[in-house]
Amino acid sequence: MRDVPPAEPASGGSADRDALAEVLRRMVADPAVLEEVTAAARTSPEVARLPVAENRRHVEVLLASGLRGFERPGSEPPAEDPVAARLGADRAEQGVPLTALLHGVQAGRVRALRIAVDRGRAAGVPDAVLLDALLHFDRHAGAMERHVIAGYHTAELELARTARDMHTQLLRRLLHGEPGPPPPDAELRRAGLRPELPYHCVLSDVADPVRARALERRLAVPGSLFGLVDGRLAALVPRLAPALPQEADPADLAALLLVSPAVAWDDIPAVHRLCADALRTARAYGATGPHRLTDLAAETALASRPELAALLTGELLGALDPADDFHRELARTALTYLDLGHRLDLTAASLHLHANTVRYRLARFARLAPGAALDDPGVLPTLRWWWALRTWLREA
């Protein structure tokens, strides 16, 4: 059968194609589109375990590949795509099943095409032009998907031949507390673990395998077990390494890192779940660097009750306007005052303000929030205002 050249658009010609090109470029650069396609890709539970930034990176590769296909009409997809292959290899190292990966890819791809069609039609682009262009878009995105799968399989074969993968699988079993008999002592000792000792759970927000290995080298002590669990660097360590050296990579120093107290083996799965909860809470507050799990106990516990936080915030801070810069300054000043133990001098120093300015702001805050018990030394009144202020500022 001879090749049939693609039909010319029924109307519009190059002007319509230029209009569609602008629609697609804006779409690829639109953060709202990126978030919407990312949400579609995260409908698979295994994919949703990964940090959102990892899913977003995947979607960025998908959209960029499709846009390249549109901008080069008639061009063949590239025979190799190192970026897509690396993405597939990362997912293999992160333990995402291939079926879950493909589900996320397909869901994101379908959503991206739907948005492109809707925006093209809204811009007045004829359907014939849309169909022709989006076929190219989808063809290149499909090729990108094949490169992702090839990279996944290559990494999967390499991992299957390494002791590192066996250690990572063991770490996942220990942290997740999977049903079935526990790993025998002989298997634990082959991995360098000593089950008679208590271990610290370590969990970070580092998902990139290259960065994860670099950070692991800085944190490892004899008897440690590191690996990517649910897409993030995790570990069991018998003791804590010294602080990161000053010459460390700035990205490593900025990585969010949670460390639990040392616990017995039976408590490891429950403590790992607490670390995962605390990691989400710390990221929501923009925290970076190393933190002890116990230091985040209050924030993590309170974050599990968002509905109650909303009711409390509405009752105590309903007169504050989130869009008002001065109201946000008042709330930050009040929260800092509580954080620093009701110390006026420390609050002024922390905010680089004169003490009289702090007094003025606290007085203005008290008028906007009648009944504000900022000077009440009681634990429960302080907790109520602290929780309300933290919640209000995060939402604002």
Image (spheres, helix red, strand yellow):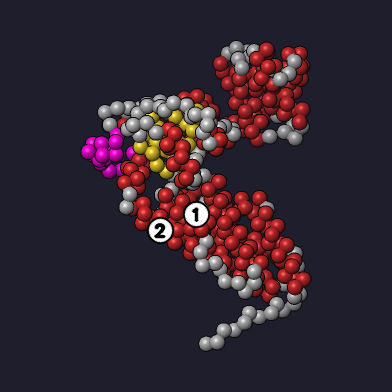
Locate residue 389, reporting x and y percent: 64, 26
Image quadrant assignment for residue 110: bottom right
**Left or right placement of residue 337 versus residue 80 in this view:** right
User: In the rendered structure, which amino acid carries the disc numbered 1?
Assistant: Leu
Instruction: Judge the density around disc 1: few (<14), some (14-19), many (≥20) Cα neighbours within 10 Å.
Output: many
User: In the rendered structure, which amino acid carries the disc numbered 2?
Assistant: Thr
> Do we see residue 393 in this rendering?
yes
Q: Which stretch appears magenta?
A: 173-193
> Do we see residue 114 in this rendering?
no
- Which residue is denoted by mark 2 in the rendering? 154
Locate residue 74, reporting x and y percent: 62, 74
Name the residue rendered at 65%, 35% in the picture: 395
Image quadrant assignment for residue 327: top right
**Left or right placement of residue 92 versus residue 167 in this view:** right
- Which residue is denoted by mark 1 in the rendering? 87
Q: Distance between the residues labelled 2 and 1?
A: 12 Å
| Residue 176 painted magenta | yes
Instruction: Judge the density around disc 2: few (<14), some (14-19), many (≥20) Cα neighbours within 10 Å.
Output: some
